[in-house]
Amino acid sequence: MHHAPYEFYGYRVACTAPEDARAVVTRLFGAPLAADTAPWPGAPTVALTVEVTETAPAPTAAPPYFPPHWDTDDRVVIDTGGSTATIEPARRAIHLTLSRADLDDPIVWGRWLVEKAFLVLTLRSDHHYGLHAGALSVGGRSALVTADSGVGKSTFTAWGLLSGAHFAGEDAMMRHVDDPEGRFWGYPRVAYLDPELVRSRPELTGARTAPVPARDKHRLEWPAAFEGRLRPAVRPQALLVLTREHRQTRPVSVTDALELCRSDFAAGKHDPAVLARVEDDLTRQLHGMAVLEFGLGPDLDDNHARLTALLDA
């Protein structure tokens, strides 16, 4: 049995897993934390236990984006047909049951189970919230990047990493209200990208990828050559709202930005006092940033050059 602490979305993860799941754990988390350390002082610990069963998986099909009653039940179960994640938000506990046949399927244990389980924990918490955003850093200055689905957020952030930026994630960024540094925490080890983009970049040859069923994206695990530019968190100086409606950079008021993000930070928050607390926290964070609508053009290099110039200003 393998026991080690890891970091995921800014949580300290106390992981217990059998040896035959150790490769899955390494691909999910990377190197373990040093003993008795945490990602940040006061970081909460999530207990993750993994077991491997001989259950035969059902034909692969995407589970619902959120399982029924995910925001109210004491135990939330994500079921892929052969493997499951059982989440107990009050205990900050996740039990992952993996079919042996799913050990080589990162869509099952990555996208559908572990990544979603940590999202549920964050959205259910009174002291955490999430944003549908990625994050990049250039020259020591960072930007959160958000957009409606399909605008190109994943491509924009991945292209930044491929162009030399530091990368903290491309789809979800988590805020721990008790983290005094004002950081947003991501999952930088993977990206969900157009397979044509992946095939077009020689530095991604041989990277581990897996197609996402019913989606035009592949789950890509960044090769080891990128390890030095993968960052678990950023303290952003800007929030960029990507659009294809124009190719300009326009200021956005904090009030408008809050409304754009409301469905993200309010998810799972049924207590008005909790919702007010997370909204106040995000308001404070946004007041310390440049909040901008960023119009994308067809030239990816030009978009990245504009980002660099904006963060250098």
Image (cartoon, rainbow, N blue to C red):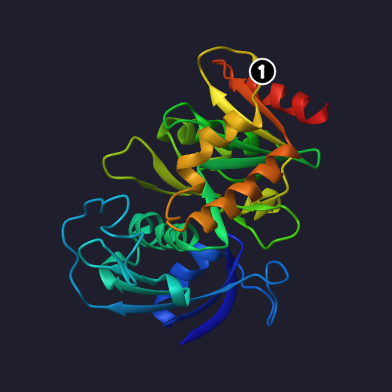
Residue at the far bottom in the pictured view: 1
Compare residues 23 and 180 and report the one nearer the observer: 180
The residue depicted at 54 percent of the width and 41 percent of the height is 133
Left of 305 or right of it: where is 46?
left
Answer above or below: position of 194 versus 73. above
Q: Is residue 191 visible?
A: no
Residue 131: x %, y % from top left: 53, 45
What residue lies at 74% left-to-right and 28% top-to-bottom? 308
Place of residue 29 in the rendered image (x, y in percent of width and height, measured from the top left): 54, 65
Which residue is at 46% across, 58% downward? 271
In the picture shown, does residue 277 fall above or below 311?
A: below
Location of the C terminus by quadrant is: top right
In the displayed structure, 28 sits above or below 99; it is above
Q: Is residue 296 above or below residue 20?
A: above
Left or right position of 311 against 278: right
Q: Residue furthest right?
A: 313
- Judge from the rendering whether residue 86 lies leftward or rightward of residue 311; answer left or right: left
Residue 213 location in percent, x, y?
28, 44
- Return the x and y of residue 5 as percentages of the image width and height: 59, 77
Question: What amino acid is found at the position of numbered circle 1 in the picture?
Answer: Thr
Looking at the rendered structure, the number of numbered marks drawn on it comes to 1
Residue ID for mark 1: 249
Name the one closer to the observer, 157 or 31: 157
Disc 1, SS? strand
Q: Residues within 10 Å of mark 1 (few under 14, many from 20)?
A: some
Between 229 and 246, the one nearer to me in the picture:
246
Q: Is residue 9 visible?
A: yes
